[in-house]
Amino acid sequence: MIFITGGAGYIGSHACVELINAGHEVTVFDNFSNSQPEALVRIERITGKKPNFVNGDIRDGSVLAEALKNSGASAVIHFAGLKAVGESVEKPLSYYDNNVLGTLRLLEAMTKCGVKTLVFSSSATVYGDPQALPLTEDHQLSATNPYGQTKLVIENMLRDLYRSDPTWRISILRYFNPVGAHASGLIGEDPQGTPNNLLPFVAQVAVGRREFLNVWGNDYDTPDGTGVRDYIHVVDLAIGHLKALERLRDHQECLAINLGTGIGYSVIDMIKAFEKASSKVIPFKVAERRPGDIASCYADPSFAMSTLGWRAERSLEDMCKDGWRWQSSNPTGYSHS
């Protein structure tokens, strides 16, 4: 049994599918603050198995500990957390409360229940403004925004915990930019309110929900002036969690591992690729840079290959085609689709 915090969310729901299809039972712990109950219904449609579910907030230590104990889980995958860079600049305390305090409560609950295997959702934002590209796991750590700071605080907390008790098994997965959707079109990214990430915004413009895309800055030191990122298909990312769990069965360790493709695409590259996949024109306007953003960020994914036997297999075309299939089949997301 695998206990999955935030398992109804975008990445969590795709991880549930991969875990169930690999023969694992899962218990989802979620409060639907940025997800929908319908995602759990769709997981069952894809896999034929209904995930166990507990409605709860990770900051509620007693509810969390009881749910973990009752699940009989041997490992935890921790997805639950706030994740928007721009919002974190506006509401830093909410991010420290939810992400840092929530993780502290989770680690306390795991200690109480004797569960010492954890796969944690970290982020490439812990590298701050890259000093060298591609980014390797030994790059210096810093952060340019409160969201990244919360991930860095949690990483340090996990490293300190492991040093204090080396019987823990911890995998820190540093995501680059998850995009796309399950090939079935049944689950995908359904942000509440205005999307904070590029691809869901592009998809909502393509489907007619939004008039145009804001491109935040076109004066970066990049080939076309727009920000360059390493976009990774969410299914490849989900499979990375499965591989991390498999490794932790045989290793007592605390390892940070990049999950990315190693390829950087600009905002303009992504717009063109999505236009091709959707046969739609994506109108856009250039706006001022957002605070906390950086010019370029992409991974060196070779450590994931050597430690997990994992590499991203899905192309930019796959990311856009699958993202468009999800958005066009569910124009308003999970609600009313």
Image (cartoon, helix red, strand yellow):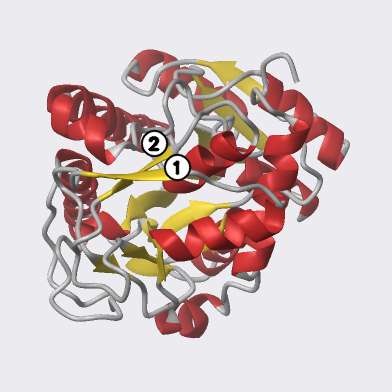
Residue plotted at (70% across, 26% down): 40
Q: Quadrant of residue 309?
A: bottom right
Residue 100 shows up from this direction: no
In the rendered view, tell whether residue 59 sits above or below residue 233.
above
Please count the marks in the image.
2
Query: Residue 290 placed where, x, y %?
Result: 19, 43
What's the mark number on residue 110? Answer: 2
Q: Nearer the viewer, residue 163 or 214?
A: 214
Q: Quadrant of residue 175?
A: bottom left
Viewport quadrant of the N terminus: top right
Q: Which residue is mark 1?
A: 115
Q: Are marks 2 and 1 in contact (CB under 8 Å)?
A: yes
Residue plotted at (66% across, 47% down): 280
Q: Is residue 180 left or right of residue 85?
A: right
Badge 2 element: helix
Residue 119 shows up from this direction: yes
Residue plotted at (30% across, 80% down): 134
Q: Nearer the viewer, residue 79 or 197?
A: 197
Query: Residue 76 placed where, x, y %?
Result: 49, 43
In the rendered view, tell whether residue 322 sits above or below residue 236.
above
Q: Is residue 7 left or right of residue 99?
A: right
Q: Is residue 211 left or right of residue 116?
A: right
Q: Give, as a three-letter code, the residue at label 1.
A: Val
Query: Residue 91 placed where, x, y %?
Result: 17, 24
Give the class, few, some or many, for how many residues have Cα within 10 Å of label 1's Cα (few <14, many ≥20).
Answer: some
Viewport quadrant of the C terminus: top right
Q: Nearer the viewer, residue 116 or 159?
A: 159
Badge 1 element: loop
